[in-house]
Amino acid sequence: MSIGLTDRPAVNAGPTGAAAVRLAVGRWQIKRRRVAALRARMLAAFAASMLFLASSLAYHAHAGSVRFAGPGALRPLYFGILITHTRLAAAVPILAGATLVLGLRARYARDVRIAKWTLPIWLYVSVTGVIVYLMLYRLFPAA
């Protein structure tokens, strides 16, 4: 089964939403000192985020940008979310990768210092990725 270009945004929303759930569950697990479970969740979240990134870049390379078709009053909200999402998303592979490497190498003091920044940024990017998808393709699809 092949995925058409018009189906790609919906497919892209899946991994980023899954990453958000895994990040939230991972946060809960670390609070309960379930390190092995946290490690599995973070690796799965990283894989989902990188799958989303690759798929999203491929989609936009072929489709270009999509205009926001929602009401004018929502444009500032949409673009505020989109701009912060895009800028912070550029940092996620670096932050998440560094945090994962430190954690896997059991360098927990440094891991924790970076993770305090990584988790909220990564979670924000994952959640806003789904919000951007919903606003662009489901709530206000272009005619």
Image (tube, helix red, strand yellow):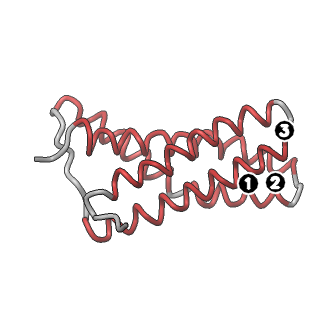
Q: Amino acid at mark 3?
A: Arg
Q: Amino acid at mark 1?
A: Thr
Residue 30 screen position, x and y as percent: 79, 36
**Residue drawn at (74%, 56%) of the image:** 100
Q: Are marks 2 and 3 in contact (CB under 8 Å)?
A: no
For disc 2, the marked residue is 103
Label at residue 34: 3
**Residue drawn at (34%, 54%) of the image:** 9
Mark 2 or mark 3: which comes first in sequence? 3
Viewer-closest of 19 and 91: 19
Classify mark 3: helix, strand or loop: loop
Viewer-closest of 36 and 126: 36
Q: Give the farthest residue toward the left.
A: 143
Q: Does 25 appear above or below 51?
A: above
Mark 3 or mark 1: which comes first in sequence? 3
Would you identify the image quadrant in which residue 49 lies? bottom right
Classify mark 2: helix, strand or loop: helix
Q: CA distance from mark 2 to mark 1?
A: 6 Å
Q: Are marks 2 and 1 in contact (CB under 8 Å)?
A: yes
**Foreground disc of the pair 3, 1:** 3
Q: Amino acid at mark 2?
A: Gly
**Residue drawn at (16%, 32%) of the image:** 71
Q: CA distance from mark 2 to mark 3?
A: 13 Å
Classify mark 1: helix, strand or loop: helix
Q: Is residue 96 left or right of residue 37?
A: left
Q: Is residue 77 left or right of residue 127?
A: left
Viewer-closest of 104 and 108: 104
Q: Is residue 92 left or right of residue 71?
A: right
Label at residue 99: 1
Residue 27 screen position, x and y as percent: 71, 35
